[in-house]
Amino acid sequence: MDVGRAGVCPVLVGRETELDALDGAFTEVLAGTARAVLLGGEAGIGKSRLTEEFAGRARARGARLLLGGCLELGVDGFPFAPFTAVLRQLVRELGTDGVAELVGGRTSELARLLPEFGEPEGDGSGHHQARLFELVLTLLDRLAQRGPVVLLIEDAHWADRSSRDLLAFLVRNLGAVAALMVVVTYRSDELHRGHPLRPLLAELDRLERVSRHELDRLTRQEVGELMTRLHGTEPSGRRVEAFFTRSEGNPLFVEALMETDGDIACELPESLRDLLLAGVERLPEETGELLRVAGAGSVRIEHRLLAAVSGLDERALTRSLRPAVESNVLVVEGEGYRFRHALIREAIHEDLLPGEHTRLHTRYAEALEEDATLVPPGRAAAELAHHWYAAHNLEWALISAWKAAQEADRAAAYAEELRMRERVLELWERVPDAEQKIGVTRQEALRRAVWAAEWAGDSERGIRLATAALREMDGDVLSQAWLLERRGRMRHQLGRKGWLEDLHEAVRLVPAEPPSPDRAQVLAALAQHLFLGIGVEEARRAAEEALEAARAADDPKSEAHVLLTLICLMAEPNYENATDQAGEGWDLLDRAERIALEMGAGQLTLRAAINRSHLLEGSGRHAEAIEVAARGIERAKDIGLFCIQGSFLSINHAESLHSLGRWDEAVEVIERALESDPPRAHRANLVLLRGEIGLARGEHALAERGLEVAYQFTRWEVDRRLQEHYPVLRLEVGLRLAEGDRRAALTALEPVLTATGRPDDSRYAWPVLANGAAACDTVLELEPLAARAAGMAVQGPVQRAWSMTFHAESARCRGRDPRWDAVADAWGELGQPYPRAQALHRAAEHAAAAGERARAAERLIEAAALARDLGAATLLEAIEDLRRRLGAGGRATPAHGLTARELEVLARLAEGGSNREIAEALFISAKTVSVHVSNILGKLGVSSRTEAAAAAHRLGILPAGHPSVA
């Protein structure tokens, strides 16, 4: 895409805090208090789009918008340019006579701004300027008496001296005008140390009626949201990462880099290049030359490295650098410099001539070969690989890429390792005697690239690399089996067909005798990927053979892998014995963990954490499951495996947080995992769980999104894992029921009505059946569900609570006593507030139907409190509706429906905290804070943060004496 109208991105994302501030200021203006808001940010950050959105809202609330833009003529340009534009707008709307009427016919001073008012009197001395300023203030005051006025001055960094003086006069005298709001925008990246706007902004910011806001760059998540809204489809995580890395969160740059197909542009669009280089081209020639040298480096460059490559002495280097730093093209950072934006460096680099490009990169490479300490520790290998490759020195590019891959492997930087491994393969045929240069065969280079791809979580590339390696295979059976096993694993990860054939062929290729680690490994892989799927019995046979082979070959690593699989294949997973974690399954898990710890096998340790948190959650030991999963996630981060196993642990972590009603924390865990671009299966589960929380909170769009992503992922068709398929059905049943479509809800659960005979069948089937029973109104509708339930096991307290829920719904349907109090108690003992609140609501409904109003009201009190704390909007609405019908409602609670987390956010909001400041204080994301703020505004019936703070004190929600910006 090209840069939009006047460099404005057409979509507004991530500006909730600033928009709230503008809306709040305008609300004060409507109440009779004039306000000024100063909005800063770099070019393309979204200032114009933000003010455009606000202007539309203000107009809808009755405001007259006056727009004045400063001209790019330098700070001594056309005098009064923005105010001339404002006056010209008023003449168009009111005519010269109308404007004259507003100022009592005293238009001679206005002639200094517009010739339509005749000739100005006098010589324009200071006396006349003061009269002009007073007249403009009078004009605005008279307009404001007719209705609220918003004066928007854009691009104040280009304002001339006269405009700055008039602006300062108006802001200082806001107290003289009741219904006026002044909004000023400026580019913070243009404000060099000597810029005349800097002291003015500092002075105005100290005034009582003035607030100042700096727009930050977008987060990775916000960039993804912007891309979705620009292109209409949700981008992949890797595409989001590419845009976020290159744009560094600047929304205009995101739009400019996006091709019509949603992909990222290889070259910078001309319009964007011009914008980026505008500041560079104004610098002295010697500074421009030094920036060209720096541009061949990286976004951040050490001072010593720049000195070595440029060849300048310290005095000349400082003299050349100073203008770049003062103009904010370069920013001092530690012992070096960073380009203010990576795309500035990219634009400068693309401007290099071919010979200049090669010469500079060669100088960088030679400098680093001579002294690797010119860059921070651990970066020399990667920097050398980059510069030799950019210098077109293929031999050294190959050698340095191989060394960089080895360094990345040692640092557990698997994505970087994969990139370097693929660089080696790219250069292999172009460098004579490549095998001698790096000391390994091409087959080994391919094998290591496959390994890196698997550990980096890039299954797509891993499959392609494994397929290429298999085509070039020269008869090494064990290597062929290894590649087939890896390709089978990655195909399974993506839900691709052919995974089972790959694993079967790998097992066939490795002889059973003599027992070997290779045999144990392929059998363990087959068992792991079959369990809970299409071949439980085959998985069990493969696991038993793998265990025998591992022990015979003295291969503890494969033994541990098999033990972890056998735990999941047990007919009774020991959910009843979780209190002391005793029994065969827990013993197997303990042994597998001991082996993993003794061997220092990080991947095995993480798999054990996945299994332990899974079993603890299934046993109702939610807090312990959270602790195990959280520790595992930190370990996954430490060893570079967060994308794969860390994201799996995040599913378990969020699931247990969800069980305990810690939904905000669960959402945080989900969002962090999604930002890592996890495998598709993990992503589907994360989005599905987010949809489950969304459904409970009345956010049906999130639930629909969860279903959409889950159904797009086809692994159910590939290996039919209940733990991935049944939760999808559970969410669909719940959503259709919430929409009032009972028939669709009952249709959605039909796949659950056939028993599977798998170890985890009851764990995942009971919740679907319980939800489905709630959709039944007749015994005929209930019978298929009852028949399925009759043959199901009940393993552990969680399944017992779901079974009780199902049977209570069944009793309701049959006209019998559902015993909802017992159900509520079961969920209460597990510490699960949401299903307890649902059961209490059901108990109240049953009591009300029996005419036991007091009993019903009693249960509704606790149900309402639980639902409020959770933010379970749909349930709370149903509870309040029943209370009203019982006559038990109508009295506001001290928190006015705010959850505990919303009260925390409100307290910080009342202190003047921005979304990002509140997020940092409460350890949640700014986006989550934004959702809370929206909920708070809705529940308090106000339209701005300022109003919310005032209402909180007025209603007694916050304690007396609590600090407030209101």
Image: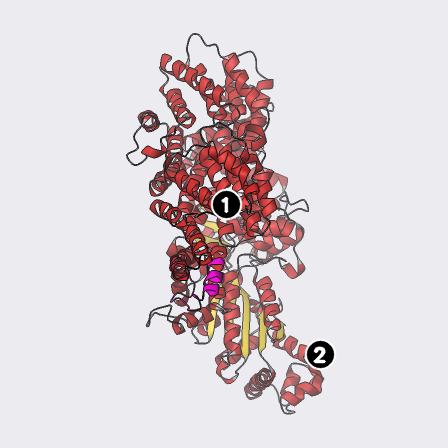
Residue 342's disc is none
Residue 388 percent location from the top left of the image = 53, 33
Q: Residue furthest left?
A: 580
Residue 419 percent location from the top left of the image = 53, 33
Q: Residue at x 66, y 46 (%)?
A: 259
Q: Nearer the viewer, residue 688 or 426?
A: 688
Residue on which the image places disc 1: 814
From this view, report whether residue 338 is shown above or below residue 156: above
Q: Which residues are magenta?
A: 878-902
Q: Secondary structure at mark 1?
A: helix
Indicate left or right for 591 with 36 as reference. left
Is 206 within the magenta? no
Name the mark nearer the viewer: 2 or 1: 1
Q: Nearer the viewer, residue 568 or 25?
A: 568
Examine the rendering and report whether any part of residue 289 can be seen: no
Q: Residue at x 45, y 54 (%)?
A: 846
Q: Secondary structure at mark 2?
A: helix
Is 893 within the magenta? yes
Residues at badges 2 and 1 in contact (C-beta under 8 Å)?
Answer: no
Give the quadrant of residue 574. top left
The C terminus appears in which quarter of the rendering? bottom left
Residue 92's disc is 2
Q: Amino acid at mark 1?
A: Arg
Rounded to the nearest whole Å, what is the CA distance between mark 2 and mark 1? 75 Å
Residue 338 percent location from the top left of the image = 47, 50
Q: Nearer the viewer, residue 129 or 622?
A: 622
Could you classify mark 2 by the number of other residues whose Cα lies within 10 Å: few (under 14), some (14-19), or many (20 or more)?
few
